[in-house]
Amino acid sequence: MARRQMHLGVFVLGTGNHIAGWRMPDAYDSFQSLPVIQHIARIAERGCFDLLFLGDTLQAGANDHPSYTARFEPITMLAALAASTTHIGLGATASTSYNEPFNVARWFASLDHLSGGRAAWNAVTSSNPRAAPNFGREHAPHEARYRAAEEFVDVVMGLWDCWDEGAIVADRASGRYIDPARMRSLDHVGEFFSVKGPLNIGRCPQGRPIVLQAGASEPGLNLAARTADVVFSVVQDLEEAKAAYASLKSRMPGFGRRPEEIAVLPGVMPILGRTRQEARDVLDRLQSFTTEGSAVSLLSSRLGVDVSAFPPDEKVPDLPLPSTSHGFARAMLSKARREGMTWRDLLNLTGAARGHWVIAGTATDIADTLQEWFEGGAADGFNIMPAWFPGAFDGFVDEVVPELQRRGLYRRQYTAKTLRGHLGLDMPANRFFPK
């Protein structure tokens, strides 16, 4: 039996995942550049990564993360990348709260065709209420957003299933272009959406694009267990990560799915040095660049409260989970309680990786930690979040990836053509055209 191997994604924010990563001397300082994203993609393919992932936000402010404030629309960017990459999966966020299912289904089906089967959709409900005024709406409560998301995802997946393979026959002799027996309408009427269908694009190379999710609330976990292929998790502690991993996997049989049909990829920011002290020095330098305003804005958004109202050297109190981002809030508040952190400590943590896990050390140290989590039942791989591009990502690919390969934990070359193949997933059954 082949040894289980890690999956690796890269979370691309062009100015770096650290909120001040762009201030490093060799860092990119723009995310509005196709050559920048193309260079990052080349590094990722050199490292045989499964997935290049672009998150998205639908609002901008002067104190937001630089890559949130000024960026290309991600589907447009990934369509351009499809022409300049050959293997890596191409994933992006599209909100279920501020889009229409037909458009989302069509975007990602198009990307799947353009890329030869490498598209992935990150279905999010958009936790930040600042997005709502950009669409002339009120931001719905958490429970309502997830009810709508459940229906939205079902509609999108249904639209992808409205075409059977081989529906386009293009028979010149008979003049028949479409086999009508292999295409059908969706005719969905639900609480939030009414969608006739079908899409005006044929069955995807992957059957359906890969579905990514990151919700950590109870509704979010159930939606992921039922529909997701990859789950991004927010972690700070190994034992908590193991418990969350087991909880998600244990839900899957209730939806008729096997645990191995989902890959759980915690987000991690690796800070690499030739020595442990050098890695700590790099992290200290990054932290010295962080401005209070940017960290306060981000932490306030994560926790759903204005943290500027709290004295910075006061211990973080017990706070209820917000109606915004449960995963981030739970991980950060748990760490604050566990370690007796002050608001200043929590602001520093947020400024570093937006609430994600940071590990600093040598390539061997980082590989040891990733192996421990992977083999210890906490992860199926990792969503790597370089502090800045390209240097921090080059370092991971050139030093940590070879160490994982030497241990037999990670592929040395691509063996599949599609993202579904990289993930070791079978072609999905078509609900309307069963084989």
Image (cartoon, rainbow, N blue to C red):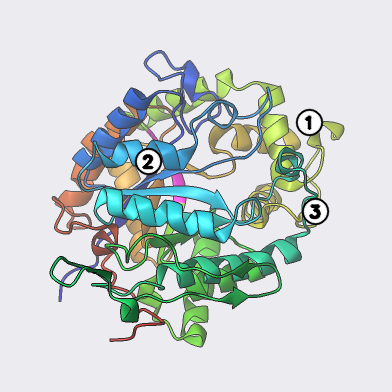
Q: Which residue is mark 1?
A: 312
Q: Look at label 1 and name its amino acid.
A: Pro
The residue drawn where x is 70% and y is 42% is 131
Percent from the top left, x then y, of residue 411?
18, 54
Percent from the top left, x then y, of residue 139?
77, 51
Q: Quadrant of residue 424?
A: bottom left
Instruction: Give the mark nearer the N terminus: 3 vs 2.
Output: 2
Is 147 in front, or is 303?
147
Q: Quadrant of the C terminus?
A: bottom left
- Outermost residue toward the front? 174
Quick check: is 269 in the magenta stretch? yes
Q: Look at label 2 and name its amino acid.
A: Leu
Q: Which residue is mark 2?
A: 78
- Please say if 315 is above or below 7: above
Q: Which residue is mark 3?
A: 318
The residue drawn where x is 36% and y is 60% is 201
| Magenta-colored segment: predominant secondary structure | strand
Alpha-carbon span between mark 1 and mark 2: 40 Å
The span shown in magenta is: 267-271
Percent from the top left, x then y, of residue 416?
17, 59
Is 392 in front, or is 41?
41
Instruction: Give the mark nearer the N terminus: 1 vs 3.
Output: 1
Q: Quadrant of residue 84?
A: top left
The residue drawn where x is 67% and y is 35% is 298
Give the structural element (helix, strand or loop) at label 3: loop
Could one spot residue 21 in this view of the protein? Answer: yes
Quick check: is 128 in the magenta stretch? no
User: Which-is-in-front pick, marks 3 and 2?
Assistant: 2
Number of residues whose C-alpha sits closer than 10 Å to that of mark 1, classed few (under 14), some (14–19) or many (20 or more): some
Give the structural element (helix, strand or loop) at label 2: helix
- Outermost residue toward the right? 309
Is 271 in front, or is 110?
110
